[in-house]
Image (cartoon, rainbow, N blue to C red):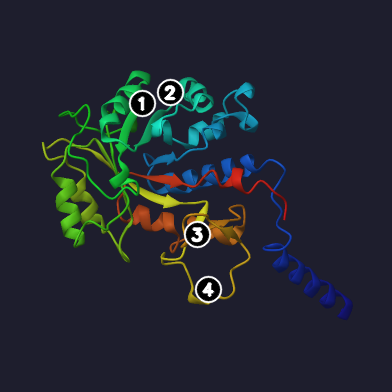
Amino acid sequence: MKHIKILLTALLVISFLSSCFKQKRSDNAGEKMQEFIIAISDYARQTDSDFIIIPQNGAELCYNYCDISDGFNQSYLYAIDGLGIEELFYNGTYAPDNERLDMLRQLKDEKKILVSEFVSDNSLIDDAYTADSTEGFACFVRTAANYDYLQIPEVIPNENNNDITALSQIKNYLYLISTDNFSSKQDMIDAIAATNFDLVIIDLFFDDTEFTSSEIAMLKTKANGAKRLVISYISIGSAEKYRYYWKKSWVRHFPCWIKKRYDGYPDEFWVKFWNNTWQEIIYGNDDSYMKKILNAGFDGAYLDNVEAYYFLYFKD
């Protein structure tokens, strides 16, 4: 009996350690990210069957083995509603990414494509919109002053009076995840409510305070009275020190699922996204990030840093 107890104790210890030190990423990190996004989608749609999932970047995840020559990954495509892409035609100046463009041309009949372009010269704004609209992509153009998504552009391309009830219907969108230009939550709500964007992407939080379901409801109507969609930003591939889940003790001793610093973002860290503890922060329980997004009444989630699978292509 004593030997059995010792064995059971050993197994429990091994199980505990495996959550951090022995939980290995498979050779195909892309498959792990596909599985993660599918699980997030499944969880959200248990509450809201129409909940919209839009991963940002990582277009190759739409294919089996992340390889365009292996055909679409149907399970993954079923889990998402669209794709967000940064700097497709313009990254400061005109610099088309032809490899991604080839993938997106195949995908645009399957899913809505939302492109965020960056132009260093305001004279290029119209050209950027034209490049994406020619391909059938919805486009948001940010300038040097708006690199961090903190301004509402004055011009709305393809402005319309249509009721927008599905992602496939959008002709334009607003990407506004910084709150720095607004003095209060209500100030930000009023500014967005005065626009006619078909879709709005914002953060779940204003500073440290979550938007409520009644506040999000105020954003679901354009200034012209038509309906629109409101989507919450969430990073699933990086941890952010200013989020509710961050513990002060982590400043000295990082949890095992934090891998390395995110260059250029001092308050962010790439995470081992396949780790169970990190995934529990993101979805699956009442304190999870996705649960908070669902409770706030957002129409969907915009999943950032899915390309973590690419930057962390390693074995522990």
Label 4 element class: helix
Q: Is residue 198 left or right of residue 48?
A: left
Find the distance from the CA under tag 2 to the CA under tag 3.
30 Å
Closer to the chain start, of discs 4 and 2, is 2
Question: Which residue position is annotated with label 1?
Answer: 137
Q: Is residue 144 left or right of residue 197?
A: right
Dots 4, 2 in contact, CB < 8 A: no
Label 2 element class: loop
Q: Residue at x 50, y 24 (%)?
A: 98
Amino acid at pointer 4: Val
Q: Residue at x 44, y 46 (%)?
A: 303
Amino acid at pointer 3: Ala
Closer to the chain start, of discs 4 and 1, is 1
Label 3 element class: strand
Question: Which residue position is annotated with label 3?
Answer: 239
Q: Position of residue 201 (x, y in %)?
A: 31, 45
**Front-most of residues 200 and 283:** 200
Question: Which residue position is annotated with label 4?
Answer: 251
Closer to the chain start, of discs 2 and 1, is 2
Closer to the chain start, of discs 4 and 3, is 3
Task: Find residue 108 and name its label.
Answer: 2
Amino acid at pointer 2: Lys
Closer to the chain start, of discs 1 and 3, is 1
Find the distance from the CA under tag 4 to the CA under tag 2.
43 Å
Q: Position of residue 296 (x, y in %)?
A: 30, 55
Task: Find residue 224 and name its label.
Answer: none
